[in-house]
Amino acid sequence: MKQYHAHRLMFGTDVMVFDSSTRKGWRLRRSVYLADQATTGFDWGDRSEGAAQLALALLADYLEDDDRAIRLHELFAAAVIAHLPFKEWKLTGSQIDAALTILEADRAEEQALAADEVPA
């Protein structure tokens, strides 16, 4: 299972991925091939472009499904990334799964309600 660890540096941020199944770690890539939303890199603890870029990169890495990552990253940024502690944080795969389960259920409910509101 993957875990994500991040901390602020003197100039910027560092986000690492650790995979317990392979016992390897690496720096999270910005996933600019999907969308380049932040010229300053990753950020968290707010609703900035850097937070959106972090959400996209983290979800693309974790899910290994670019389309799903693109679809969910703004919701994930607002619900999770915006509330991470300023200095450092850790997210486990279980925490990400739990957040996505709630976000996708809320999204499905909103879509169902919107469909019911459409006049026949």
Image (spheres, grey):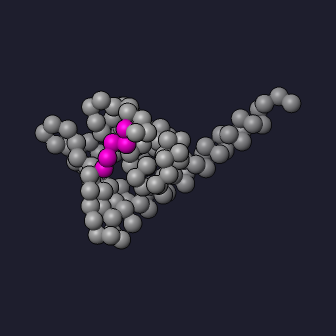
Q: Position of residue 55 (x, y in %)?
A: 40, 43
The furthest residue to the left = 10
The residue lying at 86 percent from left, 30 percent from top is: 120
Q: Is residue 74 visible?
A: yes
| 84 lies left or right of 72 | left
Q: Is residue 77 visible?
A: no
**Magenta-highlighted residues:** 28-32
Q: Is residue 31 magenta?
A: yes
At a point 78% along the width and 30% down the height, the residue shown is 118
Residue drawn where x is 49% and y is 57% of the image: 98
Residue 66 lies within the magenta run? no
Q: Which residue sits furthest front?
A: 33
Give me the residue at 42% from left, 35% from top. 35
Instruction: State left or right for residue 81 relative to residue 74.
Output: left
Q: Nearer the viewer, residue 58 or 113?
A: 58
Q: Is residue 101 above or below residue 78?
A: below
Q: How far from the left and from the top, in percent, is residue 99? A: 48, 52
